[in-house]
Image: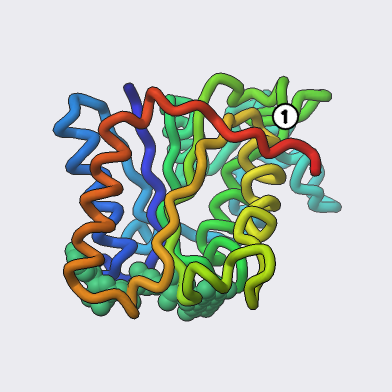
Amino acid sequence: MKILIVLAHPELKSMNGAMFQKAIAALTTAGHEVKVSDLYRDQFNPVSDRGNFTTTYDEAFFKQQLEEMHAVESAGFAIDIEQEQQKVEWCDLMIWQFPLWWFTVPGILKGWVDRVFAMGRFYGNSRCYETGMLRGKKALLSLTTGGAGESYLKDGLHGDLEGILKPVHRGMLEFVGFSVLSPQVVYAPVRQPEEQRETVLNDWEERLSRIFGEEPMVVGRY
Ligand SMILES: Cc1cc2nc3c(=O)[nH]c(=O)nc-3n(C[C@H](O)[C@H](O)[C@H](O)COP(=O)(O)OP(=O)(O)OC[C@H]3O[C@@H](n4cnc5c(N)ncnc54)[C@H](O)[C@@H]3O)c2cc1C
């Protein structure tokens, strides 16, 4: 199968970097084809503006979604966006590896979505959710937190992680058609002893060995 792994962490020697490298090795060894978008090392520009396009629909007033619809018709996406869109369209499974920042994905990954998930290309013309253009593909969030696991339960300090991740699961991934697998969460790796982090990495490898047998979650509207 074809897997795209998107990494959004500034330090490759971090736990996120280790999870990323473990996933590449495990999936490649299992015979899958892997492509990556390592956003910091690629120096991906997360700022969404006219630089997204080589074409112009309205030079007097910039409205991103109209420019996107025009770019779809005129092959007018900037090369960095076009390359990322093609990788997303290529894959059967997309994995995002990131640290939870302010209860969501790091800005560089949010900017990647802002620029790459274009109207007319991934959604639009009444196509979203079940009819989103990326229907048939799966997506998986693999993340780390600073807070401990118990703080992300329903009655915990931060509230349940499922609710925190819903804007990403529902508003970004399901919106364009992805089916979402349950997230891989490493709680507070910085507070874990070395051996526990090694176990976490081995568990991740083990899960990936049977990932294509997993059923998606039902995120739904509420
Ligand atoms: C802007 C910002 C916002 C944040 N917002 C939130 C928030 O909303 N909620 C929240 O809970 N937290 C938040 N945090 C904390 C953040 O989520 C955690 O710091 C992060 O998830 C930890 O992951 P890491 O990869 O950076 O860990 P690191 O600190 O890089 O790694 C943890 C440990 O793993 C070790 N390690 C690396 N590779 C391996 C390996 N191969 N084997 C074994 N050990 C290894 C590292 O050496 C390190 O000791 C925020 C942090 C920032 C900077």
In the image, taking residue 138 as reference, residue 161 lies left or right, namely right
Q: Find disc 1 in the rendering and name its residue.
A: 129
Which quadrant is home to the N terminus? Answer: top left
In the image, taking residue 130 as reference, residue 206 lies left or right, namely left
- Residue name at image x 28 percent, y 61 percent: 17
Residue 119, placed above or below residue 141 = above
Q: Position of residue 23 (x, y in %)?
A: 27, 45
- Residue name at image x 33 percent, y 78 percent: 190
Using a 10 Å C-alpha cutoff, classify the residue at mark 1 as few (fewer than 14 neighbours), some (14 to 19) or many (20 or more): many
Which quadrant is home to the C terminus? Answer: top right
Q: Amino acid at mark 1?
A: Tyr
Residue 129, placed above or below residue 185 = above
Task: Look at the image and tell me whether residue 10 can be seen.
Answer: no
Q: Position of residue 119 (x, y in %)?
A: 71, 35
Residue 66, placed above or below residue 18 = above
Q: Position of residue 125 (x, y in %)?
A: 81, 24
Image quadrant of residue 154?
Answer: bottom right
User: Toward the viewer: 80 or 147?
Assistant: 147
Q: Residue furthest left?
A: 29
- Residue name at image x 25 percent, y 65 percent: 197
